[in-house]
Image (cartoon, coloured by chain):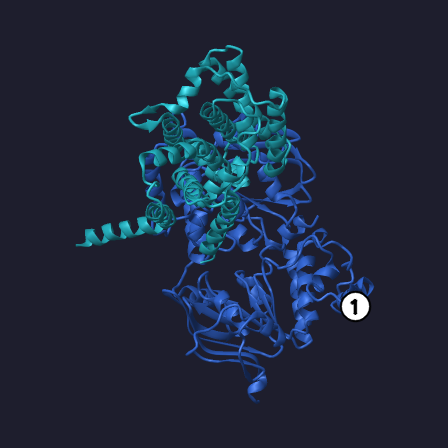
Amino acid sequence: MSQEEYAVEMENITKTFPGVKALDQVNFKVKKGEIHGLVGENGAGKSTLLKILMGVHQKDSESGDILLNGKKVEINNPIMAEEHGLAAVYQHMMLAPKLSVAENIFLGQQPTKNGIVNWEYMYQETAKLLKSLDLDEINPRARLDTLTNVQQEMVAISKAISHEANILIFDEPTALLAEKETEELHDTMLDLREKGVSIIYVNHRLDEVFEVCDRVTVLRDGKYIGSREISEVKEDDLITMMVGREIGDLYYKEEIEKGEKILEVNNLNSGKNVKNASFELHKGEVLGFFGLIGAGRTELLRTIFGADKIDSGEIKINQKEIKIRKPIDSIKAGIGLIPEDRQKQGLALPLSVQDNCTLVSSIYSSNLGVLDKKKEEKETKRNVDELNIKTPSIRQKVKFLSGGNQQKVVIAKWLNVDASILFFDESTVGIDIGAKKEIYKLMADLLKNDKAIIFISSYLPELLGVCDRIAVISEGEITGILDREEATEEKLLQLATV
Amino acid sequence: MEEKTVQDNKLLNYFKNNLSKATLFLVLFVMWGILSILSPYFFTYNNIFNLVRQTSVIAVVATGMTFVIISGGIDLSVGSIVGASGIIVSMLLINGTPILLAVLITLLICLGLGAVSGMFIYEGNVPPFIATLGMMSMARGLALLLSGGQILTGLPRSFINFAQVTFLGIPMLTIVLIVVVAAAFFVLTRTRFGRNVYTIGSSDEVARLSGINMRVNYYAIYMLNAFLSGVAGIMLTSRLSSGIPTSGNMYELDAIASVVIGGASLSGAEGSVLGTIIGALIMSTLRNGGNLLGVDPFWLRMATGLLIVLAVLFDQVRKKQ
């Protein structure tokens, strides 16, 4: 077959940022009508490569070529990329949440009649487009933020299709989706493949890559490691290619004897998302929370933590009932929350590593409101050593740290007040495998010191790998709590969709 | 050898981290240099005395504003509170209240005004811009109402003298400023309240989830700012030897400008007391120099406006890099 077998060919692409070589002679080829996985740890160069393809960044001028459908092209800006039939659906979609579906699809190019927006035509065209993608259930007139996550993503995809894109980039589209929604998305991707669209699929969750991809390319430290037919590799092989060494068992779990009851929740209610929740947690135990997005897992933790209002119910810590009205009440009782969104909820991004590590401990340690800087410095240095936080200095602003290191800073904040019950909410999303493993190891260390952990995750293998028991939550209610031995993916999913 | 490299790096890092502050100092010195050449009068004791004295009042207001802006808020009511404070203290003094008591009562009332702003902002979720815009009108109304729109004269000699006398050759008003700045610097960098202000400026949600008492801190920030505006109002009244209901007009502009020129970010979590003081000095130097060179004050007003926008523009460009 001729060269035109490939929709995208990027050959020997090098990209240098001041001081760093982000990409070093990377090769990346996507066949026509295939779903091609692009995997690698954070910082491997995936985004840089795709940004070059989308015209956001320019490759170094002396490096190789980009060919689309066999023809050499220059892509100097995103508009040129669009003209070449490229479109990207980003993790944080660039849609306007307060506008309607139709307005979003026609954003920037509303059909007009005599200079006035032709609304009827816009709605009709949108309806046609959605129908062609079997998305009839989406109303073109609905405001975007009234749709579910997956529907919003579908709108973004429709928008890309409406621009006659034949090469689509999906960058971590499932990060915010629950299992069932991910399936819907994958179905749509497979449909698009049938229509001859080529898809580049970036995803940290390897099981999902295996589910839909035809081939996969691995990058590591800005270098091209290799491309494989998906049928010829196993997950472990890919991980080895990604990290460059055998990682061993990813999920780290030690058998730790369970201690006495440390937390007991009885008939807790809060708003619509927490209904009659009752469970208990023992020292040395990891209790997992599983459920679809929006099932109320995060809300349950937030309610116990005092971030959301408690309507009724009882919370006992160390057999003693405590009243929680504000986060400080639960913090004083020994609870620490590592929130879902570390950037928006966990970290004061413009402040230093030291300020963040001591954010909570300063409440206790300061005399008459005066900070003990010496002590803070010592504490932070110990955190940096013990948690292996990679930072040039403890005065570095946390916004400049990588995801994994940022997450470690959030955890350090609670270690410094010696919290005895830790809530991990989707704590390993978006951080690389090395850092994940360190976090699992750290959890085991905490458990050995009589701490207890509640662990929310949407990723079943992870839950099954690190938890002692798993509570399943569906529409605000706990539908079952399974022991590690009896829990399987099927049972959990079944309980989650009750 | 190794140690030396580390030392060098530290020094280099220090400069990098304080680049904007160093630039600010540079701008100020260049302005002073140019003015000394253009006007022989500029670097005389009298003029510097005046410049510093003029700066003192506005710099006290700007110091309070620094807290508000670092917390991610804004306070438009400061100028009006300066005016209200001046009228209240004048009325008390004219009615024969002892100076110390008059000052105390005035400051308590100002704290109350700040608490009202804090209440609307925290309890009512009213954006600071709107809450303090309302307070701006309320406090000015209060000043006009109490004074009947008249200038209040007949203040005790000893009160008026405060603004005239010096201590070790430094104007008394500037001594007040130095005390305020030293205290503010300490509070902002060394205390938990100061740290909370930065944390709240980074993100309300992060602050709340870290156990910070949001109610106490919100009230404290706006009350502190109103308190310092009250102090400034008393200082200004002493300097003007009378209570003028329209005094402090547009001080919010100068105060915000000083803070922003001083390197604070209007999106919060960035800024320092030292930066603000340099910012305030740059503003008064511009005004003082303009007067000396006979520039039309209306032009100066336009220049001030431009300076604010340029300061923010500079900040945005720096952030993009």
**Residue at far left of view:** B1
Q: Is residue A447 left or right of residue B168?
A: right
Q: Is residue A277 left or right of residue B37?
A: right
- Determine which residue is flagged by label 1: A128
Q: Secondary structure at mark 1?
A: helix
Q: Amino acid at mark 1?
A: Lys
Q: Nearer the viewer, residue A233 or A53?
A: A53
Q: Nearer the viewer, residue A57 or A478?
A: A57
Q: Nearer the viewer, residue B103 or A373?
A: B103
Q: Name the residue rendered at 37%, 29% in the picture.
A: B174
Question: As displayed, is residue A290 above or below residue B46?
Answer: below
Let me know if residue A325 appears in the view. no
Q: Chain of mark 1?
A: A
Q: Residue B90's spot in the image, x, y percent? A: 52, 18
Which chain, by letter, is blue?
Answer: A
Question: As displayed, is residue B128 above or below residue A406?
Answer: above
Question: As displayed, is residue B162 above or below residue A268?
Answer: above
Q: Residue B151's spot in the image, x, y percent? A: 56, 23
Q: Residue B253's spot in the image, x, y percent? A: 53, 39
Looking at the rendering, in which quadrant would you find the N terminus of chain A?
A: bottom right
Question: As displayed, is residue B24 above or below residue A56?
Answer: above
Q: Nearer the viewer, residue B77 or A289?
A: B77
Q: Tally the numbered discs.
A: 1
Tell me the crowding category of disc 1: few under 14, some 14 to 19, or many 20 or more residues within 10 angstroms, Cα based.
some
Colour applied to chain B:
cyan
Q: Residue A464's spot in the image, x, y percent? A: 53, 51
**Residue at far right of view:** A120
